[in-house]
Image (cartoon, rainbow, N blue to C red):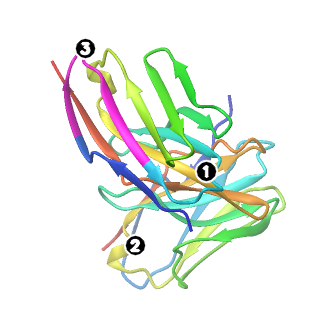
């Protein structure tokens, strides 16, 4: 099955700086890579996603890049703000028949300090 | 917009008891997923249903079972509860395009 690795496990940046989180996946057939933001005790919320036919996608301060050859994808947050502090999960979707489950990375706890 | 509805939001049970969690997916979403998330852990896939049929199974214990009903709501049944079952249980639904939308979760505490 799919295996997703995520680094770093914790990341502390100063407000205004950029943050980068990296993930690798194992299943070359995976074709959908979402990123979720989760605050303590809350549900994971989709913040951005990318499909395998695209190399980069941007939404305001958030961007995601995908390298299919190397099987890795990254989340970039620019001009970080204290409200960006949360746990971020990458995920990859591997198809299994008529449904496709998401396999999550182990998460990155981002702390944005003033 | 309608979201995924889960109930109950909080549940406290004793060891060896049984618990049932309910999930109402977003209308017209064809797939429902159940995930378990322990403290400080990533969500672990348990089971999924596509058009009311079980479509995939993950690390779901034999003590757990789930089903999706004709109205598309799903239930996760957990029996012989153990302390290690204490976790947040998320239901998610997705349309054909594949994005997963999570419910608020049900927090199960086993004493």
Q: Position of residue A56 (x, y in %)?
A: 55, 27
* Alpha carbon distance from label 2 to label 1: 19 Å
Are the residues tagged 2 and 1 within 8 Å (C-beta)?
Answer: no
Disc 2, SS: helix
The mark closer to the camera, 2 or 1, is: 1
Q: Residues within 10 Å of mark 1 (few under 14, many from 20)?
A: many
Is residue B108 something that shows in the picture? Answer: no
* Residue B34 image-quadrant placement: bottom right
Are the residues tagged 3 and 2 within 8 Å (C-beta)?
Answer: no
Tell me the quarter of the image containing the N terminus of chain A: bottom right
* Alpha carbon distance from label 3 to label 2: 40 Å
Residue A16 highlighted magenta (yes or no): yes
- The residue at the point 43 percent across, 17 percent down is A61
Q: Position of residue B102 (x, y in %)?
A: 56, 45
Chain of the residue on which disc 1 is drawn: B
Q: Position of residue B40 (x, y in %)?
A: 29, 55
- The residue at the point 36 percent across, 68 percent down is B86
In the displayed image of the protein, which residue is found farthest to the left?
A114
A76 on left or right of B40 = right
* Residue A20 image-quadrant placement: top left
B104 on left or right of A42 = right
Residue that carries the numbered disc 1 in the rendered image: B92
User: Which of A15 and B46 lies nearest the eye of the viewer?
Assistant: A15
B76 on left or right of A4 = right
Residue that carries the numbered disc 2 in the rendered image: B85
Disc 1, SS: strand
- The residue at the point 57 percent across, 71 percent down is B58
Residue that carries the numbered disc 3 in the rendered image: A16
Query: Does mark 1 fall on the same chain as mark 3?
Result: no
Q: Which residues are magenta?
A: A11-23
The mark closer to the camera, 3 or 2, is: 3
């Amino acid at each position: 099955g799919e295996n997703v690795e995520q680094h770093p496990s914790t990341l502390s940046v100063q407000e205004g700086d950029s943050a980068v989180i990296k993930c690798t996946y194992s299943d070359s057939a995976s074709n959908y890579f979402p990123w979720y933001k989760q605050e303590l005790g809350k549900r994971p919320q989709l913040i951005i996603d990318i499909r395998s036919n695209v190399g980069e996608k941007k939404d305001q301060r958030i961007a995601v890049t995908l390298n299919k050859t190397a099987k890795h994808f990254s989340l970039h947050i620019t001009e970080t703000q204290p409200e960006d502090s949360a746990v971020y999960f990458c995920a990859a979707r591997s198809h299994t028949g008529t449904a496709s489950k998401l396999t999550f990375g182990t998460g990155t706890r981002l702390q944005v300090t003033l | 917009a309608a979201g995924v509805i889960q109930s109950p939001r909080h549940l406290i049970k004793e060891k060896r008891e049984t618990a049932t969690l309910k999930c109402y997916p977003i209308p017209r979403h064809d797939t429902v997923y159940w995930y378990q998330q322990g403290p400080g852990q990533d969500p672990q896939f348990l089971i999924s249903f596509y058009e009311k049929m079980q479509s995939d199974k993950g690390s779901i214990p034999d003590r757990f079972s789930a089903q999706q009903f004709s109205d598309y709501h799903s239930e996760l049944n957990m029996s012989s509860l153990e302390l290690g079952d204490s976790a947040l249980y998320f239901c998610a639904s997705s349309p054909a395009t594949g994005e997963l939308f999570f419910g608020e979760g049900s927090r199960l505490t086993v004493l």
